[in-house]
Image (cartoon, rainbow, N blue to C red):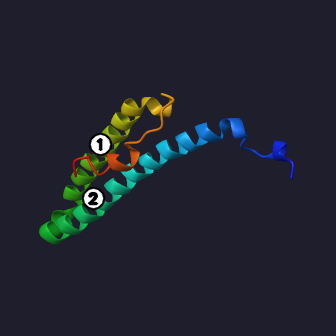
Amino acid sequence: MDKSRFWVRDSTAARSDQVLAHKQVHFDICELISRQLSQRIAHVYQAEGDVFALAFRQELQQLMAKQGLMNTRYDQETAHCCSGTRSSSGSSYCARSPR
């Protein structure tokens, strides 16, 4: 097997793992917001019926703003994954974020 033909080189594998771990936390943040949105949709629809659209838009705007802040904060805390240290807080980041 000719390893020189592989897309990922051994010299970049550690960095690739680091970037993947960083991106996975961004996915976790998105998943957290998605679950919160699903819960709010069910709650708002049951509670507010006809004014659902207005309430939903407000909830959606708040959750999207929250997602943006969480992603920005995570990137700042991890220096966009460029600090050279592996983000050990990644898996716990969403767990310690306000719900």
User: Label 2: few (<14), some or many (≥20) within 10 Å?
Assistant: some
**Where residue 46 sits: x, y (%)?**
17, 71
Residue under pointer 2: 36
**Quarter assignment of residue 51:** bottom left
Instruction: Give me the residue at 18% from left, 67% from top.
Output: 43
**Where residue 50 sits: x, y (%)?**
17, 67
Work out which residue is located at the far left of the displayed protein and give it: 47
**Quarter assignment of residue 7:** top right
Do the CB atoms of the residues marked 1 and 2 lie less than 8 Å apart?
A: no
User: Label 1: few (<14), some or many (≥20) within 10 Å?
Assistant: few
**Where residue 91 sits: x, y (%)?**
38, 50
Name the residue type under label 2: Gln
Query: Between marks 1 and 2, how big is the CA–CA gap?
Result: 13 Å
User: Marks 1 and 2: which is nearer the front?
Assistant: 2
- Horizontal side of 98 relative to 64 (left or right) equals left
The number of callouts visible is 2
Which mark identifies residue 22? none
- Horizontal side of 79 relative to 58 (left or right) equals right
- Horizontal side of 84 relative to 41 (left or right) equals right
Name the residue type under label 1: Ala
**Where residue 72 sits: x, y (%)?**
36, 35
Residue under pointer 1: 65
Instruction: Give me the residue at 78% from left, 46% from top.
Output: 6
Tell me which label, 1 or 2, sits earlier in the chain.
Answer: 2
- Helix, strand, or loop for circle 1? helix
Q: In this view, does 91 lie above or below 82?
A: below
Instruction: Give me the residue at 32% from left, 54% from top.
Output: 33
Q: Which of 23 and 56 is in front in this view?
A: 23
